[in-house]
Image: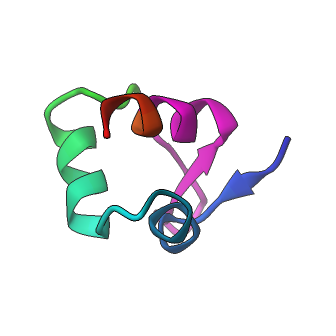
Amino acid sequence: MGTYSIKQVTEKTGLTDDAIRYYEKIGLLPYVKRQQNGHRIYDEEDTEIIFREK
């Protein structure tokens, strides 16, 4: 099980990065993990949630 950047998730799901950030903002995505530099990182569970909501 790997982790993905927001760009990789957009390519995998077909959603825009704005849509993914919005899902996070409204609480559709649970706490999104971040790297030390603040960049979001997603795991398989996160992408599964995005696919269900798409």
Q: Is residue 6 left or right of residue 29?
A: right
**Is 14 rendered above or below residue 22?**
below
Residue occupying the far right of the picture: 1
Q: Is residue 19 left or right of residue 13?
A: left
Judging from the image, the colouring scheme is rainbow
**Is 22 rendered above or below residue 37?**
above
Image point (52%, 61%), residue name: 9
**Is 30 rendered above or below residue 34?**
above
Locate the C terminus and report the quarter of the image it occupies: top left
Residue 36 falls inside the magenta stretch? yes
Give the residues drawn in magenta, as a range: 31-49
Locate residue 1, reporting x and y percent. Answer: 85, 40
**Is 42 rendered above or below residue 4?**
above
Q: Is residue 13 left or right of residue 21?
A: right
Image point (30%, 53%), residue name: 20
Image point (56%, 62%), residue name: 12
